Image (tube, rainbow, N blue to C red):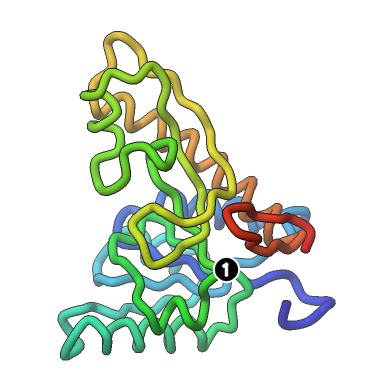
Amino acid sequence: MNDASARPRLVVLVSGSGTNLQALLDAAADPAYGADVVAVGADRTDIAGLERAERAGVPTFVERVKDHPDRGSWDEALTAAVAAHEPDLVVLAGFMKLVGPAFLAAFGGRTLNTHPALSPSFPGMHGPADALEYGVKVTGCTLFVVDEGVDTGVIVEQTVVRVEEDDTVESLHERIKTAERGMLVEQVGRLAREGFRVDGRRVVVGA
């Protein structure tokens, strides 16, 4: 951590409505949570996630891919914008871009993301739909440490959600998102307070 007496610093990246961000902001308002959201970044303007941060008095920044000559330049700019806030942890909360080599060089091993399926099953953008189509009886959500792959990082935690007979993609995804928010808030707080390290395919808490 930056200072042994300071609360761990979280930078949260969003691309949309920011419901997971709101859950983290609400949790961090409780001194017992033990971590602070110090900045919120986005890859687009005029989104509800940025408005949530502004209402909470949290600094924001935006780095759009189209404002940079190429994806590598965007990745470097995003890395610099995040680094300016000296985070202990970076949380991708509905952030719809893959971070690149510059970002991982700076924040690899301390960037977290969620996936709406039980990894390694159903990676990619359509986890709930893929689970429903396959006919599984349980699915859920995964919190993982971001690496260079798509939903391939070391697993921190998973929560199971049962698939009901009358589920649609929308109804299943809503229950997954509810489970995801609870898991994210609990585990981010735990990792921030206790520290962790990645050892092979395991996350060791209390490191």
Residue 204: in sight, yes or no? Answer: yes
Image coords of residue 41 (percent x, y):
40, 73
- Mark yes or no: residue 57 visible: no
Relative height, residue 1 to residue 196 (above, below): below
Give SS at disc 1. Answer: loop
Query: Looking at the picture, how far across and down is residue 121, in whole percent?
Result: 37, 37
**Would residue 205 be found to the left or right of residue 114 on screen?**
right
Q: Position of residue 45 (x, y in %)?
A: 25, 71
- Seen from the viewer's position, the closer of residues 33 and 96 is 96
Q: Residue at x 77, y 54 (%)?
A: 32
The residue at the far front in this view is 200
Within the image, what quadrant is residue 25 found in?
A: bottom right
Does residue 74 appear left or right of residue 119 in this picture? left
| Location of the N terminus (image quadrant) | bottom right
Label 1: how many Cα within 10 Å (few below 14, some 14–19, many 20+): many
Total marks placed? 1
Left or right placement of residue 143 versus residue 194 in this view = left
Quadrant of the rendered image containing residue 3: bottom right
**Residue at 30%, 9% in the rendered image:** 165
Q: Residue at x 75, y 60 (%)?
A: 193
Q: Which residue in the rendered view is the most extreme toward the top?
A: 165
Query: Looking at numbered disc 1 in the image, what kind of residue is underneath it?
Result: Arg
Residue at image point 18% right, 86% down: 70
In the displayed structure, 10 sits above or below 33; it is below
Residue designated by label 1: 110
Would you say 97 lies left or right of 141 here?
left
Question: Considering only vertical position in the picture, is 142 above or below 13?
Answer: above
On the image, the x and y values in percent for residue 200 come to 60, 59
